[in-house]
Amino acid sequence: MSQEEYVPGSPVDEEERSFQGIPVSAIAEEFGTPAYVYDSAVLREGYTRLRGLLPAAVDIFYSLKANPNVSICGVLNRLGTGAEISSLVELRTALRAGVSPRDIIFLGPGKTTAELEACLDAGIHAVVCESLEELRLLDRLAEDRGLAGVGAMLRVNPEFHTKGSGLAMGGKPRQFGIDTALLRAAAPTLAGLRAVRVRGLHAYMGTRFLNHADVVHNTAEILRTSEELARELGVTLDTLDFGGGLGIAYFDNEKDLDVEALAAGLREVVEPFAARFPDCRLIMELGRFLTAPAGTYVTRALYVKESMGEQFVVADGGTNHHMAAVGIGSFVKRNFPIASLTRYHAAATEEYTLAGPLCTPNDVIGKRVALPPVRAGDLIGVERSGAYGPSASPVNFLSHGHPAEVLVHEGRARLIRRRATVDDLLEPQRLIDL
């Protein structure tokens, strides 16, 4: 049953997973598998809830690295987010999605000259400089263009240690940012700038925070450090990005962040700061927290087999599209939430290892997963997969290519990235004369 044949309100198999009333079988038939399916209603609900709880002084910027699809960025921008970007393509994606240049910041430890020039040409809010050398280069490029007052921010690598991060990004030797001790001696460099004006500071301590108290602690320390540095350096705090890194629960022993407690704690530390700096733009950057719950990786079971007493489901997609499910960066492999989409509400009475089509024993995205009985042709979903999916995976391994991406928006499923074809994969290659 294709989407065109499906009429909203028609009876749906009670066991089958649906997205805004559209059965997953209809989406899979129209767009094929494997595919990522995103639900814009979940995007909206997550953003709206958080926006309503955070202090009014805090702007939410979407980190495109979590999911760089232009339609995802467009949905979030229309809800009210700015954009935090880290590449030339992400810059063009944000602009194409309708994000105003004044709501874009560019960060990353290895910006090229071409990327800095593109930022200057676009007139974005600020380039977040991660070294004094980068700041001087930006100043030279801006001066060559005859510009003045170009916005820059300095990324600080603070001296305090991160609490509660799944992946620490500061507080220890890192390629990110400028150590606090080095910044304290940077006043002469800042005074010598000709075309760039340092308008604020940035600090990002880590990601995957699940304890609200850790986020509040880190934010309080960032605000304190930034106030001290701004005073010592003579910098006017027009903008301060205090990071984000809010996590979501993937695994059985995890609980989602208490957003109400987080917002209450942030109000206690942010509102006094905002009262002292009423003209300072405060930015919280979020990626995974906004997009992960909205995405499902949909695969089709090709074969169900047994090997030495263990049941396997071999699907048409695997780690080539969902490297995050392998547990990269974790000492212990744990399963993402995985469900039978064909029998979504049925009892899980069997145990399967979910493998993909790749010629490697590492192509396993779920070990000993409890599921209802699985048959060839069933649809299996890896849930909470809206962040760090295909863009963070080796999609061209064994030349399988990029999966389709589908957005269900206002009751209609729309293709937002087509599946890679054989020609897509072969066209960039060149056969030399042999």
Image: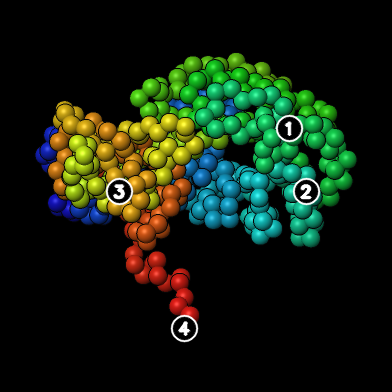
Query: Which residue is labeled 1 in the image?
Result: 237
Q: In this orientation, does residue 246 appear?
A: no
| N-term mark: 2 or 4 | 2
Quadrant housing residue 342: top left
In front of the other: label 2 or label 4? 4
| N-term mark: 3 or 2 | 2
Query: Which residue is labeled 2 in the image?
Result: 133
Query: Which residue is labeled 3 in the image?
Result: 356
Judged from the image, the secondary structure of the residue bearing numbered disc 4 is loop
Is residue 245 or residue 84 the one in the foreground? Answer: 245
Whether residue 322 sits left or right of residue 96 in the image: it is: left
In front of the other: label 2 or label 1? 2
Residue type beneath disc 3: Gly
Q: Which residue is rendered at x = 66% and y = 60% of the image? A: 114
Quadrant housing residue 229: top right
Marks 2/1: CA distance? 21 Å
Residue type beneath disc 2: Glu
Q: Which residue is rendered at x = 77% and y = 53% of the image? A: 137
Judged from the image, the secondary structure of the residue bearing numbered disc 2 is helix
Q: For mark 4, does the 10 Å Cα neighbourhood hold few (<14), some (14 to 19), or many (20 or more) residues?
A: few
Residue type beneath disc 1: Leu
Find residue 308 and report its horizontal and vertical position in percent: 21, 39
Are circles 3 and 4 on residues that touch, CB within 8 Å?
Answer: no
Find residue 387 and report its horizontal and vertical position in percent: 43, 41
In front of the other: label 3 or label 1? 3
Question: What's the mark number on residue 434?
Answer: 4
Marks 2/4: CA distance? 46 Å
Find residue 9 and report its horizontal and vertical position in percent: 15, 40
Q: For mark 3, does the 10 Å Cα neighbourhood hold few (<14), some (14 to 19), or many (20 or more) residues?
A: many
In front of the other: label 3 or label 2? 3
